[in-house]
Image (cartoon, helix red, strand yellow):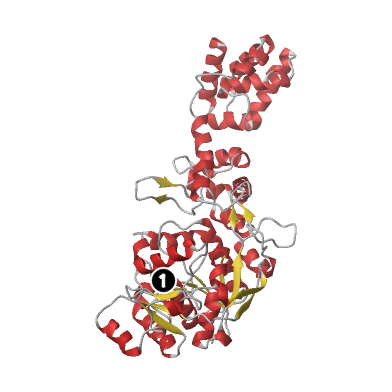
């Protein structure tokens, strides 16, 4: 077993990657980087009925966008290839046979109809059916029929599954890094299927075998896998791998924004927010929103997800990926579920947007403007928006002359003083050669002083005349960007129609 920390993210390619999965990948990545280890990507596609075309590429692209570098696995390769479970199919039967031969597993030939009948019998008696130590002796399996009959059934091609022979009276206990000691009595567990009748392994067998062969030291996964953990512990024991069994850490659930119940795609649809990192096209042609396409910056999403269930123990809220690596420990992850507060995600986005350089935003989001003008636009709106594409919208609005005017402002501010001041200001502008914010303000001041009108009496009316709305960013810089001729034309129109 390797002394190096080795973690894995092992999603199934069944559709878009939920942000809960992205958070799991992030925590794995942070731990690996913190402890100088390796991050693996394994695709768990043993259930071919749920395979969705394009899902694997989506997973790889999503992790890349978030900033998670895969050291080994699908798309990268490595010493434990292949990293898709469907390509490892042949070996799982060998491991299942190891358990058969050591008496830790058995063949079961029960048809689904026979199992349904048994289930109904139990229900009619007011109890639930479990295929376990208490019932296996009454069912059709290699524990109740002879070796010869078992082999004859297999030779004749009769369908079978291989089940784990769970010990009858045993306490299964393991220490979870987040939840401390977990105790389960084997009498509450059923003899889980390890190999299905189609020759494919179940998640449980493939997961344990692969984690062992890939020398995984820490299994960090969602709380929904906690009920399966005792079974996995039994499998490690059955194989004789208990000494090298990975440490477990089961992450808290992501809860609905109001905190009652697990976050779902339906919650996202109803709330109008994304729960996927990237946009995803559903088979019916509908589009599921993605954080990236909605305008969230990747470092804001990383920060938001990191805080869903973990805290650094300090007042710091904004972290670079390197700072998260430095601060991260599994011990600071909460047991309780974490509310998915989209407003917090928006707040993170605003903070990271402010941290982006004007040059970066100008070139990325305003490529059709001259750089000098684009920089002015970014500077004007950067502190006022949540998403970068809003800068583009605001910029476009600047260059469209208003056709309507804020009625409330017109009613309260568009008076004789305002009209006189704006008219004098308009008449003075043609002589202004250097049409920049400071000079524009200087001209306005001069004209209002001559008329004995205070600036406060005119500013909101001037804004409405120029932009049509009563509030917005720095008006002088806005006029500089709009341009002298356009400003004069807008003022003339307002004075004529209002």
Q: Residue at x 58, y 81 (%)?
A: 169
- Residue, x 39% and y 86% (percent of image)? 97
In the image: residue 325, left or right of residue 189? right
Q: Residue at x 41, y 82 (%)?
A: 106
Residue 350 seen in render: yes
Please tell me which residue lies in front, 278 or 140. Answer: 140
From the top left corner, tell me how far across and down residue 159 is, in percent: 30, 75
Element at label 1:
loop
**In which quadrant is the N terminus drawn?**
bottom right
Residue 373 visible in rendering? no
**Residue shown at 61%/61% (left/top)?**
252
Q: Which percent across, then down, holds residue 110? A: 36, 73
Callout count: 1
Please name whichever residue, 421 or 283, is drawn nearer the observer in this view of the structure.
Answer: 283
Residue 368: horizontal and vertical position, in percent?
44, 41
In front: 204, or 272? Answer: 204
Q: Report the residue marked by disc 1.
A: 74
Camera-side residue of 413 and 165? 165
Quarter of the image where the C terminus is located:
top right
Q: Residues within 10 Å of mark 1 (few under 14, many from 20)?
A: some
In the rendered view, would you say 184 is above or below 63?
below
User: Could you tell me residue 432's position as x and y percent?
Assistant: 59, 24
Q: Residue furthest left?
A: 156
Quarter holding residue 85 = bottom left
């Amino acid at each position: 077993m390797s002394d190096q920390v080795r973690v894995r993210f092992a999603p199934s390619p069944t559709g878009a990657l939920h942000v809960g999965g992205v958070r799991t990948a992030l925590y794995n990545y942070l731990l690996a980087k913190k402890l100088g280890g390796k991050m693996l990507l394994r695709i768990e596609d043993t259930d071919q009925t749920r395979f969705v075309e394009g899902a694997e590429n989506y997973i790889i692209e999503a992790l890349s966008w978030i900033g998670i570098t895969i050291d080994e696995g699908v798309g990268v390769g490595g010493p434990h290839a292949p990293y898709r479970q469907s390509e490892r199919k042949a070996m799982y039967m060998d491991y299942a046979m190891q358990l058969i031969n050591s008496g830790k597993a058995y063949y079961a030939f029960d048809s689904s109809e026979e199992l349904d009948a048994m289930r109904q019998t139990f229900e009619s008696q007011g109890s639930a059916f479990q295929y376990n130590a208490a019932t296996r002796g009454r069912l059709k399996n290699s524990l109740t029929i002879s070796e010869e009959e078992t082999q004859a059934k297999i030779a004749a091609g009769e369908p079978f599954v291989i089940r784990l022979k769970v010990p009858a009276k045993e306490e299964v206990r393991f220490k979870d890094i987040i939840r401390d000691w977990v105790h389960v009595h084997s009498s509450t567990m059923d003899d889980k299927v390890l190999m299905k009748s189609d020759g494919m392994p179940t998640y449980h067998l493939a997961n344990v075998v692969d984690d062992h062969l890939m020398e995984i030291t820490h299994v960090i996964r969602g709380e929904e896998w906690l009920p399966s953990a005792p079974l996995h512990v039994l499998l490690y024991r059955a194989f004789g791998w208990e000494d090298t069994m990975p440490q477990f850490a089961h992450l808290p659930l992501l809860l609905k924004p109001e905190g009652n119940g697990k976050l779902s795609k339906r919650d996202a649809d109803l709330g109008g927010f994304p729960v996927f990192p990237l946009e995803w096209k559903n088979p019916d042609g509908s589009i599921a929103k993605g954080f990236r396409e909605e305008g969230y910056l990747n470092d804001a999403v990383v920060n938001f997800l990191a805080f869903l269930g973990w805290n650094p123990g300090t007042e710091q809220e904004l972290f670079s990926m390197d700072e998260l690596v430095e601060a991260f420990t599994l011990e600071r992850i909460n047991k309780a579920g974490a509310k998915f507060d989209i407003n917090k995600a928006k707040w993170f986005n605003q903070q990271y947007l402010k941290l982006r350089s004007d040059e970066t935003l100008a070139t990325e989001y305003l490529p059709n403007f001259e750089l000098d003008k684009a920089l002015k636009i970014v500077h004007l709106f950067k502190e006022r928006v949540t998403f970068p594409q809003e800068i583009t919208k605001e910029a476009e609005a600047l260059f469209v002359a208003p056709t309507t005017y804020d009625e409330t402002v017109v009613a309260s501010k568009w008076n004789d003083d305002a009209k006189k001041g704006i008219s004098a200001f308009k008449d003075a502008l043609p002589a202004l050669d250097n049409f920049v914010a400071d000079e524009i303000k200087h001209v306005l001041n001069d004209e209002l002083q001559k008329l004995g009108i205070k600036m406060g009496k005119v500013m909101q009316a001037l804004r409405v005349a120029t932009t049509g709305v009563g509030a917005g960013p720095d008006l002088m810089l806005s006029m500089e960007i709009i341009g002298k001729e356009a400003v004069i034309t807008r003022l003339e129109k307002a004075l004529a129609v209002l």
